[in-house]
Amino acid sequence: MTFLEEAFEVLGKIKDSGGEAYIVGGAVRDLLMEREVGDIDIATSLLPGEVQELFDKVIPVGIEHGTVIVRHRGKSFEVTTFRTEDGYEDFRHPDEVTFVKDIKQDLARRDFTMNAVAMDLKGKLVDPYGGQKAVENNVIEAVGDPLKRFEEDPLRMLRAVRFVSQLGFELEPCTREALTTQASLLKHIAVERKASEMIKLFGGPSYRLALDMIAESDLIKELPILAEFPSFQNHVPGIPLLTWPEVITYFLGVGIGSGVNAWTKAWKLSNQVRKDSEKLDQSLKIFKRHSSITPWLVYQLPEELHDSFCRVVLSLEIGYSNIQEDLQRVHTSLPIRTKKDLSFESSDLIAMYPNRIRGPWIRDGLQSIEKAVVQGEVSNEYERIKEWVQQWNQQENN
Ligand code: ATP
Ligand code: MG
């Protein structure tokens, strides 16, 4: 059974109970484009409590906004009661959510016509704003008056641009003009919301177009760090970047931003992003210093960051195209994968110098051994390492 068929089962169950239900939003747009569907959102006339009663497994994620997650055949479906949104006084969240009975009223609150099409159980479309046509013509057009819609929720401007990146569509002229007029309102939007649109933007196939739009409009002024480097337009990455650590490492690589911390703080990104960015940044520095993939670089780079590292190097366009192969080759021939593989322990080192007072020399010594083994200066055998330490110590003393 396909994902879509499973979604239709959810619609069927709601219909059987006397409610109305439609697939809405990005899923319908992607179906019309014959593009792979990511997640499937469902809009219904049932109230959240009624949906909870109807299905066995329901996670109440945002009852006050009318949203629950229905788990069906191991998949998640976001099911939201038809609603309108009134008043956006604080530019962030609608002051009031009103549940309504009609799908058309629900579609009216949606951002772009391509996102305001609903599909029923039989595949029939409800399309009051010509969303299907917009998809056919590759156009992003605001539902209703774009000036007003961007004022209500300025994040929509950034969403428009990230859809440009992902879909390669053009902005309808009035929508485009409104974006120029209203761009500065983006300052009212929480940075976390901006961040989740921006990362999708960096990863889209038409990211160049989208970054141009950002640079040419005042949107750039409301994006932390990038705002201070209007010349970032001259530093467009060579390929799409898929994660924040990739984006951060890329920009630091071209001299934008003062360090990983500055980026993760300004964009309020997670600790995991910070840690991964630090590892990537460190690896990139080693790579630049040696102009090649060294064993030490690969040893320090966790395997789950290999793809990210390759993408960063390619995005910097430093004339290195077979990076993936090189990384794989060096990785396969590493003599050890972790410190635990080392045939020499701190107790071995202490045993060699029983009269020395314990101190940082033990940790430093082991680290030197680890590096020497990784770089192939000494083989990973107890006796060889012991000899190597003795020689090294003699040189130190001379
Ligand atoms: P994606 O494929 O990236 O998930 P999407 O169009 O589904 O794209 P979501 O952020 O998942 O985008 O939002 C789902 C739907 O909710 C949108 O298609 C749109 O109809 C509506 N929507 C989301 N954010 C807004 C907003 N800020 N203003 C108006 N409508 C919105
Ligand atoms: Mg979606």
Image (cartoon, rainbow, N blue to C red):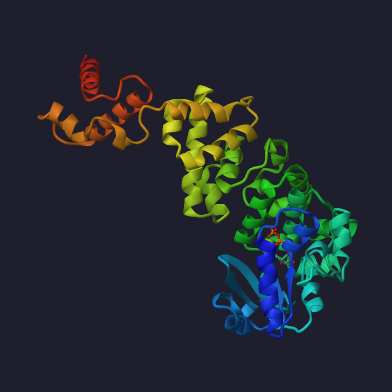
Residue 181 position, x and y percent, is 83, 59
Quadrant position of the N terminus in the picture = bottom right
Quadrant for residue 377, please give it: top left
The residue depicted at 25 percent of the width and 24 percent of the height is 381
Judged from this view, the residue extending furthest toward the left is 355
Looking at the image, residue 97 lies above or below residue 164: below
Residue 272 position, x and y percent, is 48, 51
Looking at the image, residue 265 lies above or below residue 340: below
Judged from this view, the residue extending furthest toward the front is 1
Quadrant for residue 89, please give it: bottom right
Residue 318 position, x and y percent, is 63, 27
Q: Nearer the viewer, residue 13 or 315?
A: 13
Looking at the image, residue 331 lies above or below residue 54: above
Q: Nearer the viewer, residue 366 or 251?
A: 366
Residue 386 position, x and y percent, is 21, 22
Tell me: 105 left or right of 43: right
Looking at the rendering, the quadrant in which ligand 1 lies is bottom right
Q: Is residue 69 visible?
A: yes
Tell me: 148 left or right of 95: right
Quadrant for residue 384, please give it: top left
Q: Nearer the viewer, residue 200 or 228?
A: 200
Quadrant position of the C terminus in the picture = top left
Looking at the image, residue 158 lies above or below residue 248: below
The residue depicted at 70 percent of the width and 76 percent of the height is 12
Q: Is residue 86 visible?
A: no
